[in-house]
Image: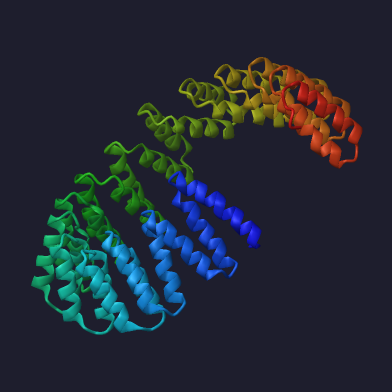
Amino acid sequence: MRAGDQAGAERVAREAADSGDNYALRQLAVLCMRAGDQPGAERLYREAANRGDTNALHELAELRMRAGDQPGAERVAREAANRGDNHALRQLAVLCMQAGDQPSVERLYREAADRGDTDALQRLAVLRLRAGDQPGAERLYREAADRGYTDALQRLAVLRLRAGDQPGAERLAREAADHGHPYALHELARLRHEAGDQPGAERFAREVADRGETYTLRELAEARHKAGDQPGAERLALEAANRGDKYALKELAALCMQAGDQPSAERLYREAADRGDNYALRQLAVLRLRAGDQPGAERLYREAANRGYIEALLELAELRMRADDQPGAERVAREAANHRHPNALHKLAVQRAEAGDQPGAERLAREVADHGHTYTLLELVKARHEAGDQPGAERLAREAADRGDKDALRNLAWLCHIAGDQPGAERFAREAADHGHTNALRELVVPIMQAGDQQVAERLAREAANHGHTYT
């Protein structure tokens, strides 16, 4: 940063700071650092800190540390801590760790902990563990827990379990769960399962479930399935479902499908469906289709639709289409559209257009439009244009525009431009502008200019300006 530039930048930053914006001073300090002006950066951080910005003290401490001045860095970090912010001390500890200075790391974390920072206690416990001092780590986790950091109880429980102290681990896990942290009980269940103690695993899973969390039962069900114990898996999944778990039966069914066990998958999806899960009904329908049972699939889609799962109507309409039952497909599609899902009608319209039935396609597109969506008409505009039927494309674009779609004529203008029909592009852009889409003219200016036709570009820019786009 040149001296003149920096002076001007400082002036602007000070104006911002005088309005209460210390961030401007810190950003200017960053610019000074990039320019190699560390004294200037420190001066600006100090100024921001004097205005009450403790974030500036963090960055100032880091600057001192990187400059090799650890005593100065610690002094600044303590200044931040004295203002109630221990982050700078933890940050310094991380820098010391990167430098391999383990004694300073532990000393700084201990100082932060003594100032009430329980996160520093947890980090200190991790360091003690890495150093092989499990008793020291446990003392620190207990200290953190006594200060209200209940996550430390979970970690303590796992440490006790690893040390072979099952009663101690259970006691701590329950203490953590009583404070709203049941994960330690979940971990005990997992470890009991891995040790082959299925009754013990289930006992802990039920303790977790008693506290309102069924994920442990669900995971045990999946584990029993993978171990080849399908009855045990289903028993646990049902237990989870009875306790309000919406996913246990479906997830187990999906695992059965992956394993090629279709009967079990269907049985579980049916159980979930009978409990009110409409997605499970849909999955059952998919299974029936894969088995070649289209009537069974349609019955299940209809059952799901009757329960309010309207998406099932879209899939039912698709099945009727595949079966070449056009009247049936339209009937179901209209039913879906009446429930605000016109996409099936849209698909039918596109299918009719692709089959060469233009009147049928337009009829269905108008039905979609009657439900407030003109996108099917726009799709037909594009198809007519690409087929070389410009009058048909224009007619449909105007119909969409008359139904309130500002994009219809604009899109047609762009299609004409891409096809090299410049007069058509301009004509439709003007019509679009007259319908309120004033961007249509402006959007043609840049590509025409890039094509080298400066005169036409300027003329269109003036027209756009007349419609309010003076920046064109």
Q: Position of residue 85 (x, y in %)?
A: 30, 60
Question: In the visual, does 374 lie left or right of 320?
Answer: right
Say if 442 sits above or below 160 in the image: above
Q: Quadrant of the C terminus?
A: top right
Q: How is the image coloured?
A: rainbow
Decide if residue 241 is in sight here.
yes
Residue nearest the viewer, comparing 156 with 104? 104
Residue at 19%, 61% in the rendered image:
149
Residue 425 shows up from this direction? no
Left or right: 119 in relation to 205: right
* Residue plotted at (36% across, 56% down): 256
Above or below, 441 against 63 in this view is above
Q: Position of residue 109 (x, y in %)?
A: 27, 73
Q: Quadrant of residue 184?
A: bottom left
In percent of width and height, residue 315 lies at: 50, 34
Q: Residue at x 74, y 21 (%)?
A: 467
Residue plotted at (58% across, 23% down): 373
Give the quadrant of residue 326: top right
